[in-house]
């Protein structure tokens, strides 16, 4: 164990991460590794596709037509999956002045309110995007670049939006159970 310094928290020599980052991964019913591995796979696919396209362009003066369309889809999917991980880890955007100020009961209520609003928003996005997917399927829309059915891409919006909403509901429940330590204001599970 190291001694506290003026610039930050006490760090354990055995732990490479600061305590607040380690504490970010609270116990959840559905493992956070799902989003972590999905992020790794998507980033790997993006890197491989982009690298292959660069090589083909360099050596043949032409490119794979499908890479841009598929890369844009993967980047959108990556943002949604990362958003799910951020919600589950309670790392979504907020104004710290309001979220971390006031009494412990106020902080708890604000954390629950934020989680409820995220859940509501993404349930709405999931419900409305089902109609988009249905229209893409019903009208046989095709993608502009390579002509595959558009619903192959749009089906992921309601699925991942529902996952984000469920992660927000889980966060709401966890924040409702959490008690605050009156001595230092830190959260205790």
Image (cartoon, rainbow, N blue to C red):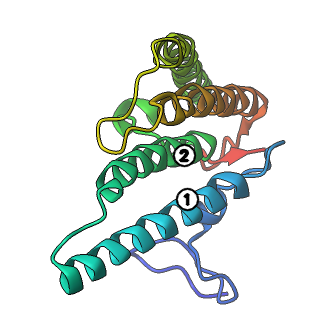
* Residue at the far right in the pictured view: 29
Q: Residue at x 57, y 66 (%)?
A: 40
Q: Position of residue 14 (x, y in %)?
A: 70, 88
Residue 123 position (above or below residue 68) = above
Q: Position of residue 75 (x, y in %)?
A: 39, 51
- Foreground residue, 72 or 58? 58
User: Circle 1 is placed at which residue position?
Assistant: 39
**Quarter of the C terminus within the rendering:** top right
Count residues near mark 2 (Cα–Cα under 10 Å), then give few for <14, some for 14-19, many for 20+: many
Query: What secondary structure is found at the residue carrying circle 1?
Result: helix
Instruction: Kindly check if marks 1 and 2 are in contact, taking CB atoms under 8 A apart as contact.
Output: yes
Residue 178 position (above or below residue 68) = above
Query: What secondary structure is found at the residue carrying circle 2?
Result: helix
- Foreground residue, 105 or 119? 119
- Foreground residue, 172 or 2? 172
Residue 171 position (above or below residue 26) = above
User: Circle 2 is placed at which residue position?
Assistant: 81
**Quarter of the N terminus within the rendering:** bottom right
- Residue 5 horizontal side relative to residue 119, left or right: left
Q: Position of residue 152 (x, y in %)?
A: 53, 35
- Foreground residue, 127 or 6? 127
In three-dimensional space, the C-alpha distance between marks 1 and 2, rounded to whole angstroms, equals 7 Å
The answer to which of marks 1 and 2 sits earlier in the sequence is 1
């Amino acid at each position: 164990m190291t001694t506290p310094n003026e610039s930050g928290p006490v760090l354990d020599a055995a732990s490479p991460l600061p305590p607040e980052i380690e504490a970010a991964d609270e116990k959840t019913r559905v493992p956070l590794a799902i989003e972590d591995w999905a992020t790794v796979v998507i980033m790997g696919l993006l890197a491989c596709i982009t690298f292959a396209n660069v090589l083909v362009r360099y050596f043949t003066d032409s490119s794979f037509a499908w890479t841009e369309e598929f890369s844009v889809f993967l980047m959108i999917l990556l943002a949604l999956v990362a958003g799910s991980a951020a919600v589950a880890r309670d790392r979504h955007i907020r104004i710290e002045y309001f979220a971390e100020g006031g009494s412990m009961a106020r902080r708890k209520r604000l954390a629950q309110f934020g989680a409820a609003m995220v859940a509501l928003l993404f349930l709405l996005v999931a419900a409305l995007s089902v109609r988009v997917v249905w229209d893409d399927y019903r009208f046989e829309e095709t993608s502009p670049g390579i002509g595959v059915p558009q619903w192959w891409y749009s089906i992921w919006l309601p699925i991942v939006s529902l996952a984000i909403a469920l992660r927000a509901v889980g966060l709401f429940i966890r924040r409702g159970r959490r008690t605050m330590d009156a001595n230092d204001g830190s959260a205790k599970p």
